[in-house]
Amino acid sequence: MSLHDDAVLVLKSYEDQAELRQTYLDHLAAHPDGMWKACGDGHITASALVIDPERERVLLTLHKKLRMWLQMGGHCEPEDVTLAGSALREATEESGVAGLTLLPGGPVRLDRHHTPCAWHLDVQYAALAPSGAVEAISDESLDLRWFPYAEVADVADDSVVRLLEATRARL
């Protein structure tokens, strides 16, 4: 199965945000290359909010290009087999945290936003940090920091706040 096919199956089984989910599915139906950065009309991206429920905190990255505190994530790569795998790869690469596991149940949210390269049709997961997780900044970040749940709204945009709220509701 291709990554494109996997994304269609993931989105068809996602039960929330019906209108936005349909926008994603329509995009993939119209764009066989809709998973890749090269698709100028927009592309599916995968992200994961790294969360430490034990200590009630999340790990955010100060994105190098966007200069915003965000969850880990980005473009799918040719070696990615599944959308969930892409999100986990991005979270691991950008956080430096070994042993992350995705919260069961598939994506937590969808978020469509414009970036300098194109529209991102982001499929957002949550990744649970293991006890004692140690982060390591990547070259894609200006900073990497744990934030208590209560401080996320002070530093991040509404998309990240909604992702945290949806993640906490699923825990």
Image (cartoon, rainbow, N blue to C red):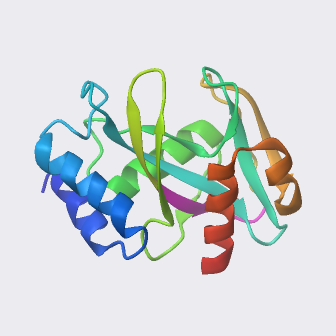
Residue extending farthest to the front is: 19
33 displayed left or right of 129 = left
Whether residue 86 appears in magenta in the rendering, the answer is no
Residue 94, quarter of picture: top right
Residue 7, quarter of picture: bottom left
71 displayed left or right of 46 = right
Residue 85, quarter of picture: bottom left
Give 80 or 42, whichever is nearer the viewer.
42
Residue sitting at x 65%, y 48%: 97
Q: State the image coordinates of residue 116 (x, y, percent, origin top left).
A: 47, 21
44 displayed left or right of 93 = left
Task: Count every numbered label the image shows and give the total.
Answer: 0
Q: State the image coordinates of residue 81 (x, y, percent, origin top left).
A: 26, 51
Residue sitting at x 80%, y 52%: 152
Residue sitting at x 42%, y 70%: 106
Give 76 or 150, whichever is nearer the viewer.
150
Q: State the image coordinates of residue 86 (x, y, percent, origin top left).
A: 39, 48
User: Could one spot residue 146 in this view of the protein?
Assistant: yes
Whether residue 126 appears in magenta in the rendering, the answer is yes
Quarter of the image for the C terminus: give it: bottom right
Eyeballing the image, is 30 above or below 10?
above
User: Could one spot residue 129 in this view of the protein?
Assistant: no
Bounds of the magenta span?
124-132
Residue sitting at x 60%, y 79%: 170
Q: State the image coordinates of residue 133 (x, y, percent, origin top left).
A: 74, 55
